[in-house]
Image (cartoon, helix red, strand yellow):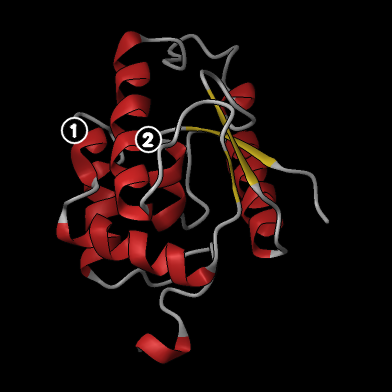
Amino acid sequence: MPEPVRFRGHHLLCMLSYQSQGYTPAFVARFDEAVEALNRGASLVLESGPDMLCETVLGEPDCHCHNASVRQRDALALHAVGQALGQTLAPGTSLSLTAEQVWQLRQGFADGSLRAACEGCQWARLCTRIARQQFPGVRLFPAAPASKK
């Protein structure tokens, strides 16, 4: 079994529309590694602050990983994703997501019910476009399970 993927709360939303785009080449490479591990069955462990993706940009002059707005984004995402999955999510929680659950989360992302945490995010327009186009080219699991297409 692959090592657990360590994500902060709002990266649960980012992974739904992730298409190998990001802040830096190192960030993209790390996100690709994380998604590949999830696709191989790795679990997710929720972090309370900077996670494995953030590690790649912590030295950047405009790094926002410690900002209060990002911590608020994490809290909103944990609440929304937890409600969608029917469980309480908090730092330290371990999740093993199925393709069906990811598809369910993508539906909530597309209809906006999971998007409160995306307010003010510089990637929100890109993610909205990806969701409107039904998640073409996403890296995490298929865009929809075969039974839902």
Image height check: is 136 above or below 53?
Answer: below
* Cα separation between marks 2 and 1: 15 Å
Image height check: is 28 above or below 133?
Answer: above
Give the image location of residue 17, x and y in percent: 39, 56
SS class, disc 2: helix
On the rendered structure, is 29 left or right of 115?
A: right
Residue kind at label 1, given as amino acid type: Glu
Residue kind at label 2, given as amino acid type: Leu
What's the residue at 38%, 72% (across, down)?
A: 136
Give the image location of residue 114, x and y in percent: 24, 47
- Outermost residue toward the right in this view: 1
Mark 2: give few (<14), some (14-19) or many (20+) Cα within 10 Å. Answer: many
SS class, disc 1: loop
**Tag 2 residue:** 78
Give the image location of residue 39, x and y in percent: 65, 64
What's the residue at 42%, 73% (across, down)?
A: 143
Q: Quadrant of the C terminus?
A: bottom left
Lower position in the chain sequence, tag 2 or tag 1: 2
Image height check: is 147 above or below 114?
Answer: below
What's the residue at 36%, 86% (across, down)?
A: 148
Image height check: is 97 above or below 89?
Answer: below
**Tag 1 residue:** 119
Mark 1: give few (<14), some (14-19) or many (20+) Cα within 10 Å. Answer: few
Q: Quadrant of residue 59?
A: top right
Q: Quadrant of residue 101?
A: bottom left
Q: Nearer the viewer, residue 13 or 132?
A: 13
On the rendered structure, is 135 left or right of 116?
A: right
Q: Nearer the viewer, residue 40 or 87?
A: 87
